[in-house]
């Protein structure tokens, strides 16, 4: 009887360990993919802010690396992300009694093409955007710009990740 219980225990532990191997805390489903590539996201916005294209590309690479076990590659990735930054603009959001802007909004939009070479039915092309509101009297330069870009990139890259690799 003890031998039988030992065998059952070992089988149950083996099953539970093997099922944990495919579980992801992020909800990501990478299927059989082992690699991904993020091609450079060119800045095609009317208002060009230097460096945002490179920073956005790196942000998307970092997010996917941190939330999956996929390996980053420059060519022939199982999952491919590419696109362009299509909008980068600042607009007034609310006015003061003196008819001046009290708050401004930076908006960034990105067009993304996603290719899953192993499961082409999951391919898509979508537009993602997000914004950052800040006091109108504040200039959007230096640390203020970095804060705005970090918040926008965090949201957009997470939305891209969710659209490509989760069923959320």
Image (cartoon, rainbow, N blue to C red):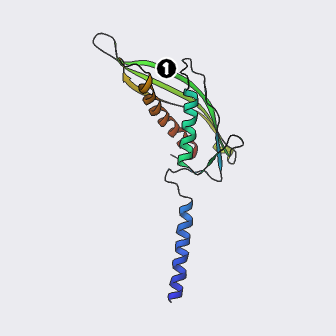
Look at the picture and state if 51 lies above or below 6. above
Which of the 4 image quarters holds residue 163? top right
- Evaluate whether residue 166 shows in this view: no
Q: Which residue is mark 1?
A: 89
Look at the picture and state if 103 lies above or below 29. above
Pick the residue in front: 4 or 51: 51
Crowd around label 1: few <14 · some 14–19 · many ≥20 (10 Å): some
Q: Residue at x 53, y 48 (%)?
A: 67
- Evaluate whether residue 108 shows in this view: yes
Which of the 4 image quarters holds residue 51? top right
Q: Position of residue 82 (x, y in %)?
A: 64, 34
Q: Position of residue 111 (x, y in %)?
A: 59, 30
Q: Residue at x 58, y 40 (%)?
A: 61
Tell me if 140 is positioned left or right of 81 in this view: left
- Residue placed farthest to the right in the image? 76
Look at the picture and state if 141 lies above or below 126. above
Q: Residue at x 69, y 48 (%)?
A: 118
């Amino acid at each position: 009887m003890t031998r039988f219980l030992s065998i059952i225990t070992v089988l149950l532990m083996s099953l539970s360990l093997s099922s944990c191997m495919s579980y992801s805390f992020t909800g990501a489903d990478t299927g059989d993919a082992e690699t991904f590539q993020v091609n450079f996201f060119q800045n095609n916005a009317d208002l060009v802010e230097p460096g945002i294209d490179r920073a956005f590309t790196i942000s998307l690479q970092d997010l996917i690396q941190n939330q999956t076990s996929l390996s980053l590659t420059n060519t022939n990735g199982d999952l491919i992300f590419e696109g362009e930054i299509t909008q980068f603009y600042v607009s007034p959001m609310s006015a003061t009694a003196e008819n001046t802007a009290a708050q401004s909004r930076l908006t960034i939009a990105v067009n993304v093409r996603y290719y899953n070479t192993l499961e082409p039915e999951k391919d898509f092309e979508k537009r993602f955007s997000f914004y950052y509101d800040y006091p109108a009297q504040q200039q959007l330069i230096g640390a203020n710009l970095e804060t705005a870009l970090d918040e926008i990139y965090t949201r957009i890259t997470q939305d891209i990740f969710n659209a490509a690799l989760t069923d959320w």
